[in-house]
Image: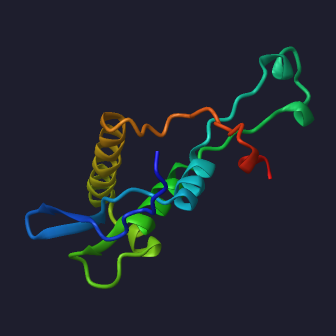
Amino acid sequence: MPLRKTDLTSTRRFEDGNDYLVLRVGGLSKGEGDRVRDLTAAYKVDPATLAGTNDEAAMIELASRTAQANRLLFELLCQEWSLEGAPNGDAYAALDEESGRWVDDCIEQVLRERRERAVKNGRSSAKRSARGSSSARAAR
C-alpha cells in the first residue's frame, strides 16, 4: 500500500430542519486515530486476578471514557455547524441530550462509511502483520 496523508479537506453536510453539521470525512490521521484508540481501548483483566479476594487493594477499576472519546471525535471532525460560535469540545458538551445524540449519530455514520470504504478497497484498519524487507538496502 502506498504512503499517503490524511485528506483533511473532504467534508459532508448533515441537515435536520434548519440545523446543520459539517463533518470532515477524509478519515483520521495516524495520530488522531491513536488518540481515539487510547480512549476506547478495551482493557482485559485475568479473572484469576480477581477470583476469591475481597481485598480492596486487589480490586481493579475499569473506567469507560466514552464521553472523552466522543468529545475528541467531535473536535477532530466537526468543521462547522448551525449553532452560534465555533464548534468546539465545550460547545459539544453543552448540547442537550437529543442534539448530542444526533451529532454522535452523524459522526458514527461518517466513521462507519469510512470503515466500509477501507474494507472495500482492501485497506482495512484491522491489525496487519509487520512486513520487513530482506534486502541489503533495508538492513542498512
**Which picture quadrant has residue 9?**
bottom left
State the image coordinates of residue 117 (x, y, percent, origin top left). 30, 42
In the displayed structure, would residue 98 be above or below residue 9? above
In the displayed structure, would residue 56 be above or below residue 50? below
Give the number of callouts.
Answer: 0
Q: Residue at x 25, y 66 (%)?
A: 11
Q: Residue furthest front?
A: 136
Q: Is residue 65 left or right of residue 83?
A: right
Closest to the observer, 9 or 55:
9
Q: Is residue 35 left or right of residue 14?
A: right
In the displayed structure, would residue 52 be above or below residue 117? above
Residue 93 seen: no
Is the image coloured rainbow, by chain, by secondary structure, or in one colour?
rainbow
State the image coordinates of residue 26 (x, y, percent, origin top left). 34, 59
State the image coordinates of residue 105 (x, y, percent, origin top left). 29, 49
State the image coordinates of residue 120 (x, y, percent, origin top left). 30, 35
